Amino acid sequence: MKRLRQNLAAFLPAYFPIAYKLALVFTLLISCGMGLLGLFIVHNQSNILEQQVSESGNTVLRLMAEFSREPLLANDHLNLEIVVNSLAGEAGILGAAIYNENKEPVVKKGTVPDDVRIAAALGQVAKLEWQKNSIELGQLDMVSFFNPVFFSDVTAGYVLITFDQRLRTLAHQKTVRAVVGATLLLVILGFIASFILGKRLTRPIHQLINAGRAISAGDYHVRLNDQRKDELGSLMQSMNEMTEGLLRKEQVEQTFSRYVSPQVAKAVLSNMNQVKLGGQHVEASVLFADIVGFTRLSEELHPEQVNSLLNEYFSIIAQAAHYHGGHIDKYMGDCAMLVFGVPEHDAEHSFHAAACALTIQKLIEIVNRQRANQNLTQVRFRVGINSGMMLAGNMGAAERMDYTVVGDAVNTASRLASAADAGEILISDELNVALQAQGIVSTRFKEFSLKGKKEPVVTYHVTGANEKQQMMIDNAISTIVNASDVSV
């Protein structure tokens, strides 16, 4: 059975629509039903025709026996011939004959069975079906009926009539053709009707399939508007509710990604059941970008102007961070904190942080020129960068937490930003060694006593990069400028 199914599956297409299946099933049902009905009709029609022929033959035989009784007893050949001749010429009657009590023919005309068949059949059966070959008509199917002629309970002789069975055969063939024709017509009409019905029934299924494909492609705005009061209608409603839920989930994720970095949002959403306080020690880089003189500006400008100014500059910083593989950890008033190397590992996090700082300072210059042309307030940023071991993870309380980094390396980066002048990028001595090997150009700046540090910290001023790395930074600047409203 398994092999039979495999053999059948080899001939069947991989995809067979339900409309075709319904049409095939209905066609098979109609064919089987009409076949059984046709067999019943043909069988019943044959029985009716045979019964009619038998009744007609017996009726004619009784009349023939009645008219032949006295002439047969009187041996009146003339009247017997009249009786036989009158019957032999009737439609459907091929022959007639009268026999004496010794089964010897007295009068016969037309086609009758031979004497041997007559001698064997008379007195035994009332009907004899036989065939005769004709040169003109070929093989003829005939049936002969017998009936004894009684006179006072004495058999005076026998009468015989032969009927042509071609009429019954033709009627049988007509019935078969009519049944076959009706069956074919109903099969064709049934196939067409079932195909159309199947198309209508499968239309909502195709809508569900298309909706499923759209959802798989990320289109959660698709809706099924077919109002049906059946199982498919319930399925469509459930599909709409599921799609609405997916759309809300996507909107929440997009909104969530605006409040935290896309990398953090991805990490949190992929492990929602494991979100808990705590973190792990990682080696990463932190960049602080602080507006110089922001306190004075906030006093001089309206709050709406301050908000617009911060949004414009922070938008540029966010694009630079994204381009170089970092993310905005948080905004703290006029300061932006950028992190590189977490939560996604980056082996070159320190270089990307320095390249991002150079990109930011160049973009700030471009934005300032544009704002100067519009008679708008311009600002300058000071940047501090540091790398090292830090704790990265969820900080806060179980009810409200942030994903961030903390540690001495983070505090040092913040202190470097505070110690820098406008437009400067300060890094520590340890970080400078690593960045010089990666193509970043810097000069020794100052030695500071930073808060929280026992020993003075030697700082370096990042001034640029070698030719190869500078080309990469310039490409980043061009890409960000072209993707934003900033004009060079």
Image (cartoon, helix red, strand yellow):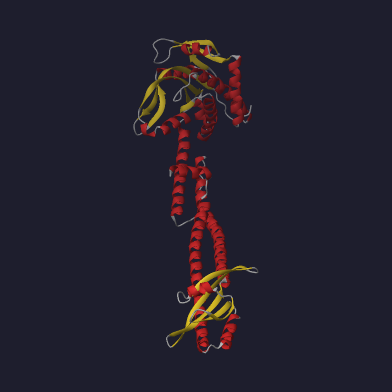
Residue at screen point 40% across, 13% down: 453
- Left or right: residue 143 compared with residue 279: right
Residues 3 and 211: in front is 3
**Residue 427 rendering spot, x and y as whole percentages:** 49, 15
**Residue 375 rendering spot, x and y as whole percentages:** 61, 30
Residue at screen point 57% across, 64% down: 181
**Residue 419 rendering spot, x and y as whole percentages:** 48, 17
Residues 102 and 192: in front is 102
Q: Is residue 483 above or below residue 87?
A: above
Residue at screen point 55% across, 63% down: 180
The residue furthest left is 398
Q: Is residue 225 above or below residue 5?
A: below
Q: How many marks?
A: 0
* Residue 55, visible in the rendered structure: no
- Left or right: residue 98 compared with residue 405: right
The residue furthest right is 136
Name the image quarter holding the C terminus. top right
- Left or right: residue 41 compared with residue 88: left
**Residue 263 rendering spot, x and y as whole percentages:** 46, 29
Residues 55 and 283: in front is 55
Q: Is residue 62 above or below residue 243?
A: below
